[in-house]
Image (cartoon, rainbow, N blue to C red):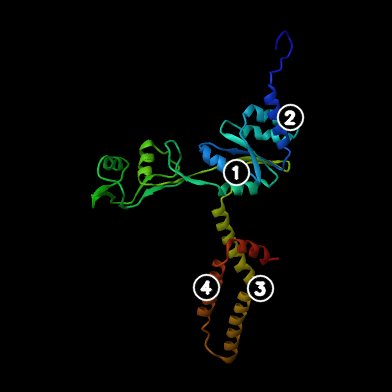
Amino acid sequence: MVGGQKVEAHVSEVKKSKVKELVELMKRKTVMVISIKGLPSAQFQDIKKKLRDKAGVQVTKKNLVNLAFEESGIGGLKELGSYVDDSTAMLFSDEDAFVISGILADEKSPAKAKAGQIAPFDIEVKAGPTELLPGPDISALSAVGLAPKVESGKIAIMKDKVILGGGKEVTEAIASIMAKLDIIPFEVGVEPVAAYMDGKVYVDIKIDREKAISDLEYDFGRAFAFAVDLGIVNSETLNSILGKASVHEGVVSRIISGEPEPVVEVVQQKKVEVKEETKKEKPVEAAAGLASLFG
């Protein structure tokens, strides 16, 4: 305030132009805050090129992004402001936010450990030969709890050893040993932080493909067995239901004729066959099958 009058901060024409550009981009279906922390510039540029047909990425100062949120007039967008910082960028797309998240999950590369990072899982060194020559590395290996020994002119590790537990911070010594032993436990890439789409802000938008496929296959297996037990007939369950009916027919025939009932082994065999058939399903087929079991 000067002399009781509110003074507006000067905004250069370049900044005004950038804000206007951002406001236009924010009209697209998905507005996403992405983390580029620790991402090498070359890899970032490569990911931007791969996304070119699906999305645009802008690395912009936080104050300009927040100003664009205000200027856009889209109320829900302001909620994204709390997720914007110096290590983030903005992504704009006409695709669904979760589709973009899945693409980003696929665009990751292995990366060597650096001091200060948090181990994603237990880092274990297996017993066996290494390519390291005898010398100072023997002391370095011993310092992190390994049992080195010289064999055939090179250093060998005598026992399996977890050198860093999952969730613990990587030290300089641990990072150095992992680099020497070519252990690469990390992946780097663009991480989705939060997204605005269809009037809502979504925060938990990371896609774990392996877990999703594993969960889908598990659900399909349970649903398949349940559908067979209920006698729900469709293209997925027909063969198993017919097989089950055949077993039951044999049991009834033996009861009527007074023959012994070797039922247990036959039923167990059929269960094994159903289980093996389920295992052979491909993820996409499992998804389609799961939907059709009760449809």
Which comes sooner in the sequence, label 1 or label 3? 1
Q: Which of marks 4 and 3 is nearer the N terminus?
A: 3
SS of the residue at dot 3? loop
* Residue 49 image label: 1
Residue holding disc 3:
231
Say what amino acid the circle numbered 2 marks: Glu
Amino acid type at image mark 3? Gly
**Is 149 situated left or right of 224 in this image?**
left
Q: How far apart are marks 2 and 3 (CA)?
A: 59 Å
For the C terminus, the image quarter is bottom right
Q: Do the residues labelled 4 and 2 touch (CB within 8 Å)?
A: no
* In front: label 1 or label 3: 1
* Mark 4 vs mark 1: in front: 1
Q: Which residue matches tag 2?
A: 71
Mark 4: which amino acid?
Val
Residue identified by numbered label 4: 272
